[in-house]
Image (tube, helix red, strand yellow):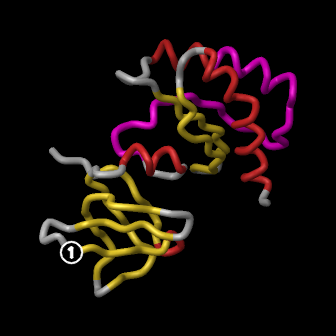
Amino acid sequence: MSRREEYEQKTEELLEPIVKENGFELVDVEYVKEAGTWYLRAYIDKPGGITVDDCETVSRRFSDILDEKDYIEDSYIFEVSSPGLGRPLKKEKDFQRSLGEEVEIRTYKAIDRQKEFVGILKEYDKESVTITYEDASTQTFQKSEIALIRLALDF
């Protein structure tokens, strides 16, 4: 397990009780470097959407724990945010909630000279994702081929 994965896992473990206590869902945690700065980000959600005040509540509570536990060696910025409309499907519950919904899949490598696919999420398991197209045909992707899968955004 990489250091980044360890930080994300530890953060999830410590943050989950705070998020649940406030009636929210912990969607994801990421530890990423952007423009030379490390960011520890927690994405939270609730029915009807997350407000700035919700993010602030979680951030204030968790900042004290971060200071106390001090398990991240680098200097970083901690942020709490809504996952937004284009949130990726990562966890079992994300896939379960999205069954029957239109999803966008981007692959690492072209498949039949194409890297972007849009269809209805039909089924999934630990290794694969199957979508149905408008013409009722289906296509199955190995999760290892998928760079990104998220709900399709229609405007």
Would you name the residue on which mark 1 appears?
Answer: 137
Front residue of this view, candidates 25 and 154: 25
Q: Is residue 10 left or right of residue 126?
A: right
Callout 1: 10 Å neighbours few (<14), some, many (20+)? few
Point 58% across, 49% down: residue: 34
Provide the residue span drawn in magenta.
Answer: 59-87
Instruction: Please tell me which residue is depicted at 81% across the width and 40% down the height of the picture.
Output: 72
> Would residue 125 appear left or right of 85 to someone viewing this image?
right
Q: Quadrant of the C terminus?
A: top left
Residue 9: which quarter of the image?
top right
Task: Name the quadrant containing residue 119.
Answer: bottom left
Residue plotted at (14% across, 66% down)? 134
In the rendered image, residue 41, in percent from the top left (x then y), is placed at 60, 37
- Tag 1 secondary structure: loop
Q: Is residue 149 above or below residue 23?
A: below
Q: x and y percent of residue 146 in the render?
A: 46, 69
Q: Quadrant of the N terminus?
A: bottom right
